[in-house]
Image (cartoon, rainbow, N blue to C red):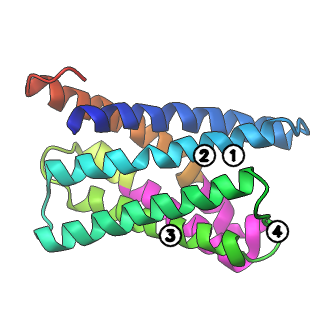
Amino acid sequence: MVRVAAQAAYLIAIAGLVALVAIGLFFADISAFGPVNDLALLAMTLALAPVMLGFYELGGRTPTGLARLALVSGIAAVIGWSVLQALMIGGAVSFDYERGATGAFAGEAVALFVMGMWLSGANLLAGAWLTPLVRWLGVVAGIGFILFGLGLLLGGVSHPLTYAGGIGYQILFPIWAFLLGRRLTAIGESRGLAA
């Protein structure tokens, strides 16, 4: 699982970079990059589930029952967000980005909040296998997810919390994932696994 989690972390980093470039081009009035951003965010989010499993396997300072609850909640949020995102990409649901999130969009916002709680908590409570830089970058990125989700619920994409959270969600999260991928690769190599 450590090897798979390392590969998934690198996928998060790559998809995050693609999403960041695509959203920049979309805001530069090149509308064709909107769907590229949507697909990259879907790939980035789906890749979080194997990372969650890797964290669970490596362990930390959380009792097993709470760790399992966090894992199940986190993976459920990843799946829920991804299904809603795929439905939006496919045109089955639409989002009103200028108002506080409702309907399917509110479901995505709540899922982001839950993923942020997992991200902050898992990094904060991970064992000594996690380096301080990766740990604290993960905590801050998780707070970004939480703020992003809250901002969407309160006022849509133009809410100040959405902007603040977007830094953690679209910038710090992929950086964290890249550094985590390197750390997991090193752990895999020390255990004799090819990462």
Judging by the rendered image, the residue that carries numbered circle 2 is: 41
164 magenta-colored: yes
Q: Which element carries disc 4, helix, strand or loop?
A: loop
Q: Disc 2 to disc 3, how far (Cα)?
A: 15 Å
Mark 4 is surrounded, within 10 Å at the Cα level, by few (under 14), some (14 to 19) or many (20 or more) other residues, namely: few
Decide if residue 91 is on the left or right side of residue 193: right
Q: Disc 2 to disc 4, how far (Cα)?
A: 18 Å
Q: Nearer the viewer, mark 1 or mark 3?
A: 1
Confirm or deny contact between disc 1 and disc 3 (CB under 8 A): no
Judging by the rendered image, the residue that carries numbered circle 3 is: 113
- Give the quadrant of the C terminus: top left
Nearer-N-terminus badge (4/1): 1
Mark drawn on residue 38 = 1
**Res 188 quadrant in image:** top left
Q: Disc 1 to disc 2, how far (Cα)?
A: 5 Å
Q: Which element carries disc 1, helix, strand or loop?
A: helix
Residue 138 x/y as whole percent: 37, 52
Extreme residue in the left direction = 191
Identify which amino acid the numbered label 1 is placed on.
Asp
Identify which amino acid the numbered label 4 is placed on.
Asp
Q: Which element carries disc 2, helix, strand or loop?
A: helix
Above or below, 56 against 154 in this view is above
Residue appearing at x 69%, y 79% in the figure: 154
Above or below, 54 against 161 in this view is above
Q: Disc 4 to disc 3, how far (Cα)?
A: 19 Å
Nearer-N-terminus badge (1/3): 1
Judging by the rendered image, the residue that carries numbered circle 4 is: 96
Residue appearing at x 65%, y 39% in the figure: 19
Identify which amino acid the numbered label 3 is placed on.
Phe
Residue 1 x/y as whole percent: 22, 39
Confirm or deny contact between disc 1 and disc 2 (CB under 8 A): yes
Mark 1 is surrounded, within 10 Å at the Cα level, by few (under 14), some (14 to 19) or many (20 or more) other residues, namely: some
